[in-house]
């Protein structure tokens, strides 16, 4: 019937709309929203919260403990789903909303879809200032929610119930876009969320959003083929776009056919199995010896779905060949144009499939293939050496080795901040493209536990291991209650080195000798140079419902991992490691860590001298064509 309507509150309309959104990828349809995380308060209780109760049979609701963590759980879910599934997150007004800003930034930096909704001040204003309202003398339109504007891909404040009719399709356009996706924010004034309106029924019909596979411009693809065929020592830098477009198989076919080796970013790790003879492993600051040596004299870098961050490029220092050129395959135009590249602004799988037949007859040669295979073999032996280190307390690399040895190929490892992401990128032997779920775009401390929860919810058939340091664990252990609440099985490995060893390394790099990075008692000197503080962190996990294991040796770690794997419940394995021991950098990998120009501390003066020696390695990468 034309012009048929249904009377709903705006909160009800939003949830009902979400229930009926689907995506289609390569002819396969699936429901897009897997559920709604929420912490209820006066800013949302009568709007979307009420709607969540009304439609609970069709839109699962999950009770969070921390607003930032709810967003991180949604990110972990969407990452594991290769961005082809999403969760929504709801908070009240004020601090509940601003707690989510960090999560929004994490989603947007990593290009991961998350729908974030928060209560807002009354649109009619007669009640103002309401509880938790941030007032501005310059405009009554401003609220704390405006803090989201710089960290989301789409921002809207719905001040009339009918605005949902045009806003919600825009929300879906951004969330399902291969190029524009990230955090999406809806501010919902607490009165407007309860207002009723006669919505057109068409708004709630099943809608299928096709995820496109955009093709490259023909002239640009021909130019790219020409550059590749001219290259003598090319390499591929594989980023998250390989996974998100499901391009692993065609990438493997292309490198096998041409002999072009692959270095990986954090998001792209696992694009090629670790033991493929053309796999160089991680590139950049946390890179392998082989990847960084090849990068230093490569004449062409074919970038596939990467932002080319400072960690992957060694702060623009590892690509040292004066004639190096770039071809960038990326759905996001800004990334495609970086470094004066040939910009192939399109889907990774579609583009690699087009390149494959056009590169018939091109091969890097037996000598180059043998060189790459030798790097792969050497690195595998180096990882074995690092895993076998015999120290007391045990080395972090040895803990990683024991965890890896306990896993199957499809099992998943999650971490985000501290020294673990760099170490894991170097040494973790990925055997499945979904097995490595490390958040490092925002390197957000506190992501690990909720991110692992999201990954487990997305892949209940896989064992999920969350590796976490004592520093980030103390930031947000409350989310362990969620694995108990949701009856999820996650294996947490808590590594305690009594402080921030990762930033301690950076502190040493700038000459500050680990200042402010140790967990020690403060003495009369006013500094934290007293005895180490011993915290009973396993008791926190035990109190929140987890099985706990405190271990000291390899044998105890192996037994605990075996017991945790056999259990149907979540477990936490606690192990102490040495603060000073770290996996080294390889092939002079360098990260630009600005160092004080003047200082009266000897360590800083020495560090500045070292910084000035390395700074000339850094350069703008702007070569568009080779000089005559």
Image: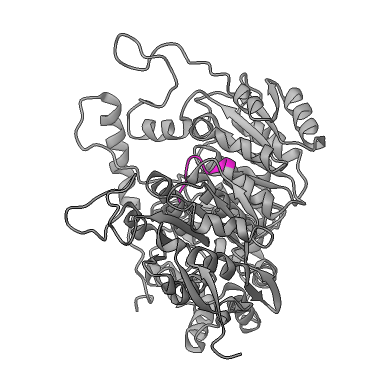
Q: Nearer the viewer, residue 115 or 298?
A: 115
Q: Which residues are magenta?
A: 442-449
Q: Which of the 4 quarters of the picture holds residue 233?
A: bottom right
Q: Is residue 354 above or below residue 330?
A: below
Numbered circles on residues, count: 0
Identify the residue at horizontal 59%, vertical 29% (top origin).
Answer: 495
Identify the residue at horizontal 52%, vertical 66% (top origin).
Answer: 14
* Residue 252 in the image, given as x and y percentages of width and height: 68, 67
User: Is 8 a magenta residue?
Assistant: no
Q: Which of the 4 quarters of the picture holds residue 381?
A: top right
* Residue 77 in the image, given as x and y percentages of width and height: 61, 55
Q: Say whether residue 525 is left or right of residue 598.
A: right
Q: Nearer the viewer, residue 88 or 560?
A: 88
Q: Outermost residue, right direction?
A: 566
Q: Nearer the viewer, residue 487 or 61?
A: 61
* Residue 494 in the image, given as x and y percentages of width and height: 61, 30
Quadrant where the image shows the N terminus: bottom right
Identify the residue at horizontal 71%, vertical 55% (top origin).
Answer: 432
Quadrant where the image shows the C terminus: bottom left
- Chief secondary structure of the magenta portion: loop
The answer to whether residue 185 shows anywhere in this view is no
């Amino acid at each position: 019937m034309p012009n048929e309507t249904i009377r709903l509150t705006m909160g009800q309309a939003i949830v009902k709309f979400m229930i009926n959104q689907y995506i289609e990828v390569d002819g396969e349809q699936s429901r897009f929203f897997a559920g709604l995380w929420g912490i209820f308060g006066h800013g949302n209780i009568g709007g979307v919260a009420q709607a969540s109760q009304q439609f609970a049979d069709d839109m699962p609701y999950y009770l969070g403990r921390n607003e930032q963590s709810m967003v991180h759980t949604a990110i972990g879910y969407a990452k594991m789903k290769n961005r082809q599934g999403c969760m929504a997150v709801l908070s009240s007004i004020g601090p509940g909303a601003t707690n989510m800003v960090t999560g929004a930034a994490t989603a947007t930096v990593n290009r991961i879809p998350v729908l974030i909704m928060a209560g807002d001040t009354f649109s009619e204003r007669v009640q103002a200032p309401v509880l938790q309202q941030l007032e501005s003398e310059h405009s009554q339109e401003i609220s704390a929610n405006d803090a989201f504007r710089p960290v989301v891909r789409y921002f809207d404040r719905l001040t009339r119930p009918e605005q949902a009719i045009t806003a919600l399709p825009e929300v879906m356009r951004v969330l399902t876009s291969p190029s524009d996706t990230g955090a999406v924010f809806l501010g919902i004034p607490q009165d407007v969320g309860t207002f009723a309106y006669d919505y057109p029924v068409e708004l709630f019909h099943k809608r299928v959003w096709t995820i496109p596979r955009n093709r490259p411009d023909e002239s640009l693809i021909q130019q790219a083929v020409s550059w590749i065929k001219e290259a003598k020592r090319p390499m591929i830098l594989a980023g998250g776009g390989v996974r998100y477009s499901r391009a692993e198989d065609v990438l493997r076919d292309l490198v096998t056919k041409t002999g072009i080796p692959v270095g990986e970013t954090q998001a792209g790790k696992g694009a090629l199995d670790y033991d493929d003879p053309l796999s160089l492993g991680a590139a950049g600051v946390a890179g392998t010896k082989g990847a960084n040596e090849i990068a230093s004299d490569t004449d062409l870098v074919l970038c596939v779905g990467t932002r080319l961050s400072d960690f992957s490029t060694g702060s623009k220092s590892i690509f040292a060949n004066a004639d190096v050129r770039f071809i960038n395959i990326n759905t996001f135009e800004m990334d495609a144009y970086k470094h004066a590249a040939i910009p192939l602004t399109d889907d990774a799988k579609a583009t690699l499939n087009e390149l494959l037949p056009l590169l018939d007859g091109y091969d890097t040669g037996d000598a180059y293939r043998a060189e790459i295979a030798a790097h792969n073999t050497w690195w595998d032996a180096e990882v074995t050496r690092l895993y076998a280190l015999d120290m007391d307390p045990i080395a972090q690399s040895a803990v990683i080795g024991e965890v890896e040895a306990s896993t199957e190929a499809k099992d998943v490892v999650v971490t985000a901040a501290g020294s673990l992401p760099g170490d894991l990128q170097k040494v973790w032997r990925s055997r499945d493209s979904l097995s490595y779920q490390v958040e490092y775009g925002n390197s957000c401390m506190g992501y690990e536990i909720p991110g692992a929860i999201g990954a487990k919810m997305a892949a209940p058939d896989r064992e999920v291991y969350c590796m976490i340091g004592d520093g980030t664990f103390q930031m947000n252990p409350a989310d362990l209650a969620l694995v108990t609440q949701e009856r999820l099985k996650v294996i947490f490995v808590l590594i305690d080195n009594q402080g921030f060893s990762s930033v301690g390394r950076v502190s040493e790099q700038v000459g500050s000798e680990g200042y402010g990075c140790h967990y020690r008692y403060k003495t009369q000197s006013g500094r934290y140079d007293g005895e180490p503080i011993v915290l009973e962190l396993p008791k926190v996990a035990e109190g929140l419902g987890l099985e706990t294991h405190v271990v000291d040796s390899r044998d105890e770690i192996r037994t605990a991992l075996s017991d945790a794997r056999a259990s149907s419940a979540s477990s936490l394995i606690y192990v102490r490691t040495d603060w000073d021991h770290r996996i080294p950098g390889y092939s002079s990998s360098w990260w630009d860590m600005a160092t004080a120009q003047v200082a009266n501390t000897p360590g800083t003066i020495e560090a500045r001298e070292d910084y000035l020696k390395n700074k000339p390695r850094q350069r703008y990468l702007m070569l568009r064509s080779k000089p005559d």
